[in-house]
Amino acid sequence: MIVSEDLAKRLLSQYGLPVPAGQAAQTPEAAAAIAQMLGGSPFIVKALIPAGGRGKAGGVKVCASIETVTEAAYSLLSHDLLGYRVASVLVEKAMPIAREIYAGVVANLTTDSFDLVVSFTGGMEIENAAQSNNQAVWQLSVEPGDILPRYRVSQWLRQISAEDVNIEALARVLVALYRAAADLDAVLLEINPLAVLTDGTLSMLDCKLEIDDNALARQPELAEVYRQSLSSRELRARDLGVSYVPLEGDIGVITSGAGLGMCTLDLLKLQGLVPANFLDTGGGISESLVQGALELIMEPPQVRGAIIILYGGINRMLEASKGIVAALQLIPGARPLVVKILGNQQEEAWAMLEKVPNVHVIRVVQTEDAVAKLAELVG
Amino acid sequence: MATFLLDKSTRAIVQGITGRVGQTQTHWMLAAGTPLVAGVTPGRGGQMIEGLPVYDTVADAVCNEGANASVIFVPAVAAREAVIEAIDSRLRLIVVITEHIPMRDTMEFKARARCAGVTVIGPNCPGLFVPGFGKLGIMPANIFSRGTPKSVGVVGRSATLCYEVIANLTGAGLGQTAAVGIGGDPVVCTEFIEVLKLFEADPATDGVALVGEIGGSAEERATAYITTMRKPVVALIVGRAAPPGRRFGHAGAIIRAGSGGADQKIKALREAGVTIADTPSQIPGLLKQRLI
């Protein structure tokens, strides 16, 4: 999950990390009240959306007065930016910047470790710098499970010639940043920019935090935030225990397994069909799971047909077919459904489903045949 | 299959044998002829499950049963502990079926296994199946075949897609020497390249079917080795129709900022001499062409 900037900054401040004073607002009036409370000027008003490139797209505004904060919030809220509806803005005190540093804790999938990454080249896009083999990007690899002692970071900073930066202050911040990333199960924690202010102190002006979805079980506060960020369909999928991704097309898809699901999307594309979703049942196929999944994917009115590919293994496939029958009794409209079921009790499952109107059973192993059948039926 | 993963000398335990999935899968592993000797669940020592003694610790199973391998069904919250216990008990092969293990936990036990010289397969994988010797994991036995003139090895990320590929191979008369599911997480402990090396070295294996998917760069990392292989490799890469930035069922199946896309994997594999299949059912025919 991607954590919103205001929550990420609040979490980082709990590690003693320097973040600007500020708060999120849902209305222009609330934004003005926050500016009033912060006092002084100027202020920064930022659209809270989970996308990069926000500044260039006009989502960050510097405001000289409380009136301009109100105007900025008014112009951002309830508008679309980079494909997201802006539901809240972050109002902060603007900081006097002397120079900008990039600091990050990034999963390195070549060494299987979390690296500390620093660049002293301000204003540069870090990905481009890294790809051009630019010496301006420095990476410190840390053995998994290891603690990162400050002396190591200090030594490293000295080697990478950060002579005009207060090395001890920066090392303290980087060690706390690394600790925060580990505690929060971050797969990505980027501070860009980490500003050196005119008085020499450091301030984290922007922050991108992505949490490992697999770790939400041990991050209860973040798990709750994640639940609240889901659409009602995504929430139903989560409660069913299936992996669901809404897509833009008109063909419903259910598969048992992620690879089989991606393969089915590819095969649909080869037939000129566009999927309305991806849904992976996972291993525990039951009647109620299949029923809930089928109701879910048939819900969007544009869905004009669906394909179900189940490789049951030891799961009882008669249960799956009961789930299909139960869902079809509740789903409106006569839309074609192609079902390929293999596994324990497959013959009983086929016999049950072949009696159901609009259901077409594929008895062979080839998913291609099921996709071709669906293409023929939906035209 | 050569004597490296699962063979006559294997004496395997099931960690998490008292759980619902662990117990059921133990039944099917035994039915497939797997040399299982015990189960381990902390606090449940002394019970019998599926005719196997249950111990509290892996060390007890090593002392009493001579265990040298493990298959792990322990829930994600306790999986890190279970894998580390198995590594510290000096088992030589550990297969981690558990899904939803946090990436940091996997990185930690992967590093520990590397130091200890232990082979860990997974996590979030279907395990391995060696026709004639059984299975450590959840792959269904009825799709496999052996004894045909030509035999191939299968390595893939995804469980059920591998099953479809294996069933296609069997249907086309190509037997299998072994199938290894390496797992769908961004960090897995055994990569494509390591399994390819096993197949290249195995005298009974004539060729390899590789089943990859979007996300990460494990397929690309294997290409330098593939160019040195004598045996043909046919690959299927799924997720070609998947839009970037979204995760498709596997934690690792996501295209990010220009990396992990299917097209670049396919290009890299082609350049390494791999034949690319567009669908699972093309794999047997393409392999046969290259096995002549």
Image (cartoon, rainbow, N blue to C red):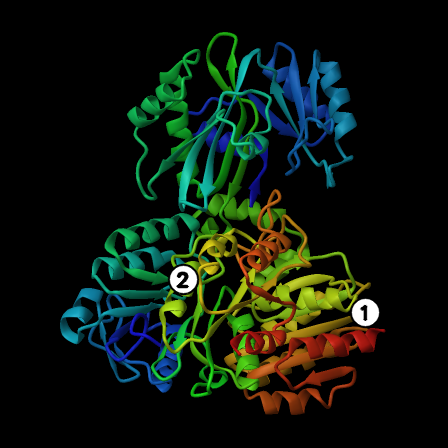
- Measured as percent of width and height from the top left, residue B247 is found at 59, 54
Q: Tell me the amino acid under the disc marked 2.
A: Gly
Secondary structure beneath disc 1?
A: loop
Q: Between B110 and B73, which is closer to the camera in this rendering?
A: B110
Q: Between A73 and A158, which is closer to the camera in this rendering?
A: A158
Furthest residue in direction right, as rendered: A379
Please give left or right for residue B88 compared with residue A316 in the image: left
Q: Residues within 10 Å of mark 1 (few under 14, many from 20)?
A: some
Q: Between B35 and B61, which is closer to the camera in this rendering?
A: B35
- Measured as percent of width and height from the top left, residue B5 is found at 32, 71
Task: Provide the chain ID for the residue under circle 2.
Answer: B
Q: Residue at x 35, y 17 (%)?
A: A168
Q: Residue at x 74, y 41 (%)?
A: A83
Task: Provide the chain ID for the residue under circle 1.
Answer: A
Q: Quadrant of residue B191?
A: bottom left
Read off the residue under disc 2.
B122
Distance (Cα) linking label 2 and label 1: 38 Å
Q: Tell me the amino acid under the disc marked 1.
A: Arg
**Is residue A308 visible from the viewing direction of this image?**
yes
Label 2 with label 1: CB-CB less than 8 Å: no
Secondary structure beneath disc 2?
A: loop
Please give left or right for residue A256 compared with residue B4 in the image: right
Q: Nearer the viewer, mark 2 or mark 1?
A: 2
Read off the residue under disc 1.
A304
- Measured as percent of width and height from the top left, residue A323 is found at 63, 78
Image position of B242 with respect to A364: above or below = above
Q: Quadrant of the C terminus of chain A?
A: bottom right
Q: Are marks 2 and 1 on the same chain?
A: no
Q: Quadrant of residue A342?
A: bottom right
